[in-house]
Amino acid sequence: MSVYEFEVRTLDGRETDLTPYRNKVLLIVNTASQCGLTPQYEGLQRLYDSYAEQGLAVLGFPCNQFGAQEPGTSEEIGSFCRTNYGVTFPMFEKIEVNGPDEHPLYRYLKEQTPPPVESTDGEKDIRWNFTKFLVDREGRVADRIEPAVKPEEIEPRIRELLGIK
């Protein structure tokens, strides 16, 4: 199985998979509109603007599992992201990233990476909003980046995966 095979639903309700992103470097992020980390949308958009032509795709997956910080509808989420942060990268329907109803994409992403460094019990669950996964052009999960790491801090790794010196 590869990351491209997972079924997802866009914010406007269309079913799709991730095959349109084949041969791109992916930055997959669970997002929230009412979180202290929400300003990371700005950095995510900057990365997308800077590297989309070189093959970067940022994919946002809203999630309401952490402090109920993403309570809105798909329409409200899309409007918030466009209005407040100028988001033009693809956003998808709200999902769960942990637990019995976790989205299969997130189960796969977590299985492909070691537990976070701060995990004392080896648990791979997502700990908060804005956990990021980098996927290389071959569809392999390259890195798991924890929420406090700002998008601009991972730019060197993105450039490396894109093959930019």
Image (tube, rainbow, N blue to C red):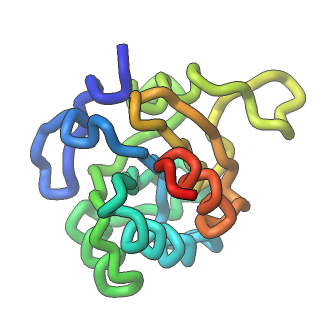
* Quarter of the image with the N terminus in it: top left
* Quarter of the image with the C terminus in it: bottom right
Residue closest to the far front: 165
Q: Residue at x 53, y 48 (%)?
A: 65
Of the pair 102 and 109, the residue shown nearer to us: 109
The quarter of the displayed image where residue 45 is located: bottom left
Residue closest to the far left: 14
Q: Residue at x 74, y 28 (%)?
A: 115
Q: x, y (%) of residue 22?
A: 27, 35
Looking at the picture, does residue 96 appear above or below residue 34?
Answer: above
Looking at the picture, does residue 110 appear above or below residue 85?
Answer: above
Residue closest to the far bottom: 83
Q: x, y (%) of residue 103?
A: 39, 31
Q: x, y (%) of residue 104?
A: 39, 25
Of the pair 62 and 133, the residue shown nearer to us: 133
In-image side of 6 versus 35 (left or right):
left
Q: x, y (%) of residue 59?
A: 37, 52
Of the pair 60 and 121, the residue shown nearer to us: 60
Q: Residue at x 52, y 31 (%)?
A: 141
In-image side of 31 versus 145 (left or right):
left
Task: Tally the marks.
Answer: 0
Of the pair 95 and 151, the residue shown nearer to us: 151
Residue closest to the far right: 120
Q: Residue at x 28, y 71 (%)?
A: 88
